[in-house]
C-alpha cells in the first residue's frame, strides 16, 4: 500500500506541529509536490549534495530536514554553483524536501528533549517560552444515558487535560426542556410536545488548536439531533511553548566531570567550556543550535550550566562575568534528533514505507588534539 506526501506531512505535523514554530520560520514543504508518492524517506539535520546523493542511492524520494534548504528568497538558481546544483539534482530526481525547524526544536520529543534525555536530566520544563496555549471551556448538556459516552469521546479527542491529569471534567445533573417542531426527528420526545429530560451539564477544558476535533467527537457521540453546547475563551493560560529545556541531574557533580559526561553522551570530538572546573553543577539548561543570546535567561532560570552552540568570544566573557558556566557543544549536536524522528515516523507510517536516518556527517568543523 503506497502513501502520498500529504500523509507523510500529516505525520510530521502531528509530531512537530507547525503552530510551535516561531513567526516567519522557513518550515514545511520547500521542494516538491505534496501529492507525490512516498517511496522512501531520509531524515537528516542538513541537506547538502552528499545527502541528496544518499537519498538517490537509498531510493528515498522524500527528505525530512531540520535546517531549511531555502532560507532566504532565491534570486537565481545557478547550476554551476553548489546551492543551485543541489536544487537542480533534487528536481531532476523528483526528491521532495520537508523542513521542521523551530517546531521540531519545541516539540515534546524534539531536539532539546532528546538532548536533555541523553544527559539524564529530570523534571524538564521549557527554558525560553515564546507562546502559551490558548484554552477554552466546553459546556454541553447530555442525557444521563449518554453522559459517559460523550465524556469519554471528548477526552479521547484531547479535552480534559490539566497538567499531567487527564479526564478533568465537572458534571451536575439538571432538567433540560425542548419542544420538537415540524421537520425534526428527535431522539427523545414527540413533535409539538414539551419534553423534560434529566440531563447532565458536562464542563471541560481544551486547548484552542484541538477545538474542531473535540467538537466533532462530541457531536458524533451525542444522541441529539441538535446539540446544545457553549465554548468560552479562558484567561487561564495553557502549556508554555518554546525551545530549550531546563532540568536537574540526579546528583550534583563538578563542571569538569559534567563536561566529560556531555562529551561522551553526545559523542563529541571536543567542546568549549566557560567556568572553573571545580564549580558545582546540578541544574542544567540546554538549547540546541545557536543559543548565545539567551545566557541571561538561563542564569535567571537558575541554571548552574548552560549547554548550547555557536558561542562567540564576547558572549563567553559576559557569561563568565555573570557567573554562568557554559558548554559550547556546537550547532551540529542537533543531529541527535534524527534517530528520534526516524523512529517516530516509522511507527506512524507503519510498514508502508521505509524511513532511514542519514549517515552523512554534515558538520563542517574538525578537531585536532595533541
Image (cartoon, rainbow, N blue to C red):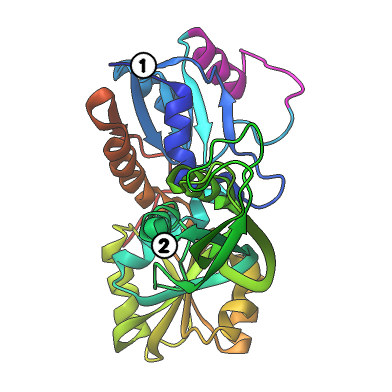
Q: Where residue 144 is drawn, which disc sits there? A: 2
**Mark 1 surroundings: few (<14), some (14-19) or many (≥20) residues within 10 A:** some
Residue 210: horizontal and vertical position, in percent?
54, 51
Q: Say which element carries label 2.
A: helix
Task: Choose between 221 and 94: the one closer to the eye.
Answer: 221
Mark yes or no: residue 220 visible: yes
Q: Is residue 307 visible?
A: no
Residue at the top extreme, as displayed: 92
**Does residue 85 show up magenta in the picture?**
yes
- Report the Cα–Cα distance between label 1 and label 2: 59 Å
Q: Quadrant of residue 8?
A: top left
Which of pointers 1 and 2 indicates the residue nearer the eye?
A: 2
What residue is rendered at 35% in x and 34% in y? 360
Instruction: Name above or below for residue 366 compared with residue 33.
Output: below
The quadrant of the rendering that contains the C terminus is bottom left
- In the image, is residue 190 part of the stretch drawn in magenta? no
Give the image location of residue 303, x and y in percent. Answer: 49, 83
State if disc 2 and disc 1 touch (CB < 8 Å): no
Which SS class for mark 1? helix
Relative to 293, 267 lies left or right: left
Q: Residue at x 28, y 24 (%)?
A: 353
| Magenta stretch in the rendered image | 74-92
Quadrant where the N terminus sits is: top left
> Residue 220 at what x, y percent from top left?
46, 42
Residue at the far left: name it: 351
Question: Considering depth in this image, is 170 or 335 the residue closer to the camera?
Answer: 170
Residue 358 found in image quarter: top left
Q: Which residue is mark 1?
A: 56
Residue located at (63% from left, 72% from top): 237
Amino acid at each position: 500500500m503506497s502513501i502520498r506526501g500529504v500523509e507523510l506531512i500529516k505525520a510530521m505535523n502531528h509530531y512537530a506541529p507547525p503552530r510551535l514554530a516561531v513567526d516567519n520560520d522557513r518550515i514545511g514543504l520547500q521542494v516538491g509536490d505534496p501529492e507525490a508518492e512516498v517511496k522512501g524517506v531520509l531524515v537528516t539535520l542538513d541537506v547538502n549534495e552528499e545527502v541528496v546523493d544518499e537519498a538517490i542511492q537509498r531510493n528515498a524520494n522524500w527528505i525530512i530536514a531540520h535546517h531549511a534548504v531555502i532560507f532566504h528568497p532565491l534570486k537565481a538558481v545557478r547550476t554551476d554553483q553548489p546551492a543551485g546544483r543541489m536544487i537542480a539534482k533534487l528536481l531532476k530526481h523528483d526528491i521532495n524536501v520537508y523542513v521542521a525547524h523551530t517546531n521540531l526544536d519545541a516539540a515534546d520529543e524534539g531536539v532539546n528533549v532528546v538532548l536533555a534525555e541523553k544527559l539524564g536530566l529530570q523534571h524538564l520544563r521549557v527554558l525560553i517560552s515564546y507562546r502559551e496555549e490558548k484554552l477554552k471551556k466546553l459546556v454541553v448538556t447530555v442525557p444521563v444515558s449518554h453522559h459517559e459516552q460523550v465524556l469519554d469521546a471528548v477526552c479521547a479527542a484531547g479535552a480534559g487535560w490539566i497538567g499531567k491529569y487527564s479526564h478533568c471534567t465537572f458534571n451536575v445533573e439538571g432538567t433540560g426542556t425542548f419542544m420538537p417542531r415540524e421537520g425534526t426527528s428527535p431522539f427523545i420526545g414527540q413533535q409539538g410536545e414539551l419534553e423534560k429530560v434529566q440531563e447532565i451539564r458536562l464542563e471541560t477544558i481544551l486547548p484552542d488548536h484541538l477545538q474542531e476535533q473535540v467538537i466533532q467527537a462530541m457531536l458524533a457521540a451525542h444522541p441529539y439531533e441538535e446539540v446544545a453546547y457553549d465554548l468560552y475563551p479562558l484567561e487561564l493560560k495553557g502549556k508554555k511553548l518554546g525551545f530549550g529545556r531546563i532540568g536537574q541531574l540526579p546528583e550534583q557533580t563538578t563542571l569538569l566531570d559534567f563536561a566529560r559526561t556531555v562529551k561522551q553522551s553526545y559523542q563529541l570530538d571536543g567542546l568549549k567550556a566557560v567556568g572553573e572546573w571545580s564549580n558545582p553543577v546540578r541544574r542544567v539548561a540546554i538549547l540546541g543550535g545557536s543559543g548565545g543570546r539567551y545566557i541571561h535567561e538561563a542564569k535567571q532560570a537558575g541554571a548552574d550550566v548552560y549547554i548550547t552552540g555557536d558561542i562567540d568570544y564576547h558572549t563567553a566573557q559576559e557569561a563568565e562575568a555573570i557567573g554562568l558556566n557554559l558548554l559550547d557543544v556546537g550547532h551540529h549536536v542537533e543531529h541527535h534528533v534524527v534517530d528520534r524522528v526516524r523512529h517516530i515516523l516509522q511507527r506512524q507510517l507503519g510498514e508502508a514505507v521505509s524511513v532511514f536516518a542519514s549517515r552523512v556527517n554534515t558538520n563542517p568543523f574538525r578537531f585536532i588534539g595533541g
